[in-house]
Image (spheres, rainbow, N blue to C red):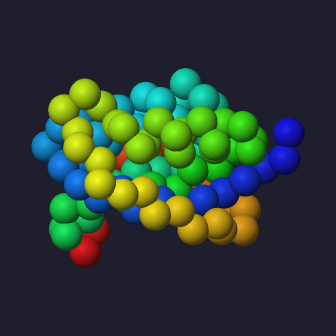
């Protein structure tokens, strides 16, 4: 049960389709820490931190997203685990 932390950028039709709320629910279900937010360029950005298995699970789910979404790409960057993450999973304001 090794910890893994990733930064993710999801592109496609991922805003206006409840992608952030869906992500928050899925991450909470998997016991992940981190956050999700919209980007002004139309993408969704997230940090996921948890067990290897839970992070792999959320990454697989992100490739389809909620029913109304159309995911064109999921870019994943590994990140060192940090103490700068919330205790749970948060919604963050839109960023540039």
Residue 35 drawn at (x, y percent): 47, 51
Q: Which of 37 and 7 is in front in this view?
A: 7
Q: Which residue is drawn at 64% across and 50% down?
A: 49
Residue that sits furthest to the bottom in the current view: 96
Q: Is residue 9 above or below residue 96?
A: above
- Tell whether 81 sits left or right of 8: right
- Which quadrant holds the C terminus? bottom left
* Numbered disc total: 0
- Tell whether 12 sits left or right of 33: left
Residue that sits furthest to the top in the current view: 29
- Tell whether 64 sits left or right of 47: left
Q: In this rendering, does residue 2 appear at all?
A: yes
The part of the image, by quadrant, that contains residue 12 is: bottom left
Q: Which residue is drawn at 47% across and 36% down?
A: 61
Residue that sits furthest to the right in the current view: 1
Q: In this rendering, does residue 21 appear at all?
A: no
The part of the image, by quadrant, that contains residue 66 is: top left
The part of the image, by quadrant, that contains residue 64 is: top left
Q: In this view, does 26 lie above or below 74?
A: above
Residue that sits furthest to the front in the current view: 72
Residue 7 drawn at (x, y percent): 53, 63
Q: Which residue is drawn at 25% across and 28% down?
A: 67
- Tell whether 11 sits left or right of 29: left
- Which quadrant holds the N terminus? top right
Q: In this view, does 77 lie above or below 37?
A: below
Residue 94 drawn at (x, y percent): 25, 61
Q: Residue at x 84, y 47 (%)?
A: 2
């Amino acid at each position: 049960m090794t910890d893994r932390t990733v930064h993710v950028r999801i592109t496609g039709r991922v805003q206006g389709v409840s992608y952030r709320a869906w992500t928050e629910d899925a991450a909470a279900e998997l016991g992940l820490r981190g956050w999700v937010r919209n980007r002004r360029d139309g993408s969704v950005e997230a940090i996921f931190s948890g067990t290897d298995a839970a992070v792999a699970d959320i990454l697989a789910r992100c490739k389809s997203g909620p029913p109304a979404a159309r995911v064109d790409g999921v870019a994943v960057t590994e990140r060192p685990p940090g103490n700068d993450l919330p205790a749970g999973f948060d919604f963050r304001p839109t960023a540039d």
